[in-house]
Image (tube, coloured by chain):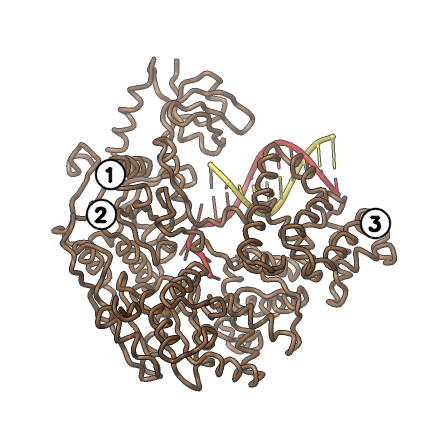
Chain colours: A brown, B red, C yellow
Amino acid sequence: MDRILEPLNDKQREAVLFTDGPLLVLAGAGSGKTRVITHRFAYLLREKRLQPSNILAVTFTNKAAGEMKERITQLTGLDTSTAWVRTFHSMGVLILRKHAEEIGYPRDFVIYDDTDSRGLVKSIMKESGINTDVYNPSSIAEKISRIKESLQSPEDFVKQIESEMDEKVALIYQSYEKALRRNRAFDFSDLITIPIYIFKKNNKVLSYYQSLWHYVMVDEFQDTNKAQYEMIKLIGSVHKNICVVGDDDQSIYGWRGANYDHIYDFRDRYNAKVILLEQNYRSSRVILEVAHAVVEKIPGRMDKKLWTQESSGEKVFLINALTDKEEANYVVSRIDSLLEEYDYKDFAIFYRTNAQSRLFEEELLVRNIPYRIFGGQKFYARKEIKDILAYIKLIIDPFDSASFERIINVPKRKIGEVALEKLKKVASDGKTSFIDILLNVEKNPSLSRLPFEALKELGRILEELREEKEKLTPMSFVKILIDAIGYKSYITSFDEDGLDRWSNVEELINSIKEYEDDNPGALITDYVNDITLQSSADEIEADDSRNYVSLMTLHNAKGLEFPVVFICGLVDGLLPHASSLYSARDIEEERRLFYVGITRAMKILHLSYSESRMKYGELLYQNPSPFLNDIPEEFVEEVDLFKEKKDIFGWQSKIRKKEEEDIDDIEGNGELKIVEDISDIKVGDKVYHHLFGKGKVAAITKNFVTIDFKDYGKKVISGNFLSNIEVVSS
DNA sequence: TAATCCTTTCTTTTT
DNA sequence: GAAAGGATTA
């Protein structure tokens, strides 16, 4: 009858009905959080007779925003295209588009992602003579965005310098901001902090939005950073109809500046109504017990415990393998054997770092099991894609030095380091765009020795497309561009992968076509901005459209659920990650990450670890994750892939023994000798490799050995890693 | 200036 | 084992 209120449990309904005034919904994993937000949105529309544009709902991923919108449409039958269901960042872009010019920012701007920001920081460091070996550009860039997101200007930060590092950061921060403005670029932090600046500076703008959005909702509130929280406070400061939904147990983005204390601050500052959602609709009882055992060790967390009406379910499998390879092999064979009961789409493999995906990928390939790896930013990080995007960015923003640098000699125009420096120098006044410089090269005496025909031609192409960019569809824009610069012939002859690279460019064109169809009337500018704000979480499809096993990091797993889950590589150093060991707060975050992974599982959960793993091509011994000790035995079924008893052999000797067994297996076995120098082997030698097993030397060059492995095919081994190889002396 | 070859470093997670 | 940086040679 009432499809908005009927499907809700008492607590959920309470949260939906409490519309006016500050509300904190503490929503445990799998407790119907999204349902509360969407139903609340729908309820507000119906009860308060509001336009969809009068409610703001903020999320962190485009995917979450898209799904919410769709759900609201289903619930209300209303057109929600004007509804403000967006990510913080895309909301920021809209505000900047509309108001940036009013306070002296440019209308045509580009967005720098983290890679761009890091690159800018790096070049600033080089210019100002700061050693990039002593100070890591990535951590400096990260530090700068933390400072920006805590709303401190370079001048503010200078006042609280505490170390030599801070001093450098302050210096770089200042130049970095100048460079961003000169390039007419905004970084990710700017997308939040500059709208705040606009709100504070121009009260009219702020009150416009305050009266536009009668109600404000924030999803995943534990993930907000200071700037994001500030923005919500500003927008809601008049009516205070702010509803935040979150879970302190699922706070895993502290390293990105998120602070779950915002939950407690919100509760106290606004004296908010608090509603606790503790009924879980996802997991078996055993899985919830295990999850709770892991997370309850965190001091100071809000005390809550998920419960379910479901049965206990199967015990959690705890798998102990010899090597990471064996671990992956077991996981995939287990998937294979469960395929009688489950579909591909029901399985997920989670790990701490993207690099861990490789072994699982190899095993899945062997068994012909369809899979997809999420994350890793692969496609847009490719050279050929970045080249084209840099061209587009430069056309949109002819002041963008980063894009200019990238493309000025792509395809080759005989511009090297020296020529580039000259060109950049001319642009450094911040008033001359790179297109203008190109069009007028021959008039500038300092550029007299440059190959000006090619440069002028480039200038003309860019200028023409710039004039046309609002008249062309994104696809025709890109096609004209690629054609005009002769990119196809350049890239196909670039290296031996030229044809593959070109097919990636074709794939890019396809994706632009798709974008065009999904967003009628959108321009190339919109496309570039949107894909910059796209995250790996956005790619993950709804389960009914999947037909593959999903592989992803634990971070990417948040918000998802799968009937059968594998959490792999549960060893000390990976989870908790070695880089977290200096701070108790970081280790707690690792623990929550584990918790997030566990609570994704609906029916069967596997936890696996191995005694050893390959790192940088070298064998590394490791201990099980200390978090495993917190799981009560009664919920666990152990699968020990070793035949021997642990107390008889130490684990290192077990590895040795397994290797010996494998080696015994080599045909025509002779004495084994560790390879110390490349001259110890010759083509045709039988070898044993610690990772890849048996093989035959196929080719030798000065510093590399190609080995044809029985199980892995041909692989090139660097001369640095010869110690992993043993040769059979004949 | 550009291509090639070799050496070094690096890995945490990402809007 | 990849990617980026550096040195060397054409």
Please give the name of the residue rendered at 53% of the width and 75% of the height, measured from the top-left corner: A157
Give the CA distance from mark 1 to mark 3: 65 Å
**Disc on res. A338:** 1
Please give the name of the residue rendered at 51% of the width and 66% of the height, measured from the top-left corner: A90
**Disc on res. A604:** 2
Q: Position of residue C3 (x, y in %)?
A: 54, 44
Protein chain holding label 2: A
Q: Which residue is mark 3?
A: A452
Q: Tell me the kind of residue under disc 1.
A: Leu
**Disc on res. A256:** none
Looking at the rendering, in which quadrant would you find the C terminus of chain A? top left
Which picture quadrant has residue A439?
Answer: bottom right
Protein chain holding label 3: A
Judged from the image, the secondary structure of the residue bearing numbered disc 1 is helix
Please give the name of the residue rendered at 77% of the width and 50% of the height, measured from the top-left corner: A458
Asked whether the viewer can see residue A654, the reply is yes
Relative to A425, A181 lies left or right: left
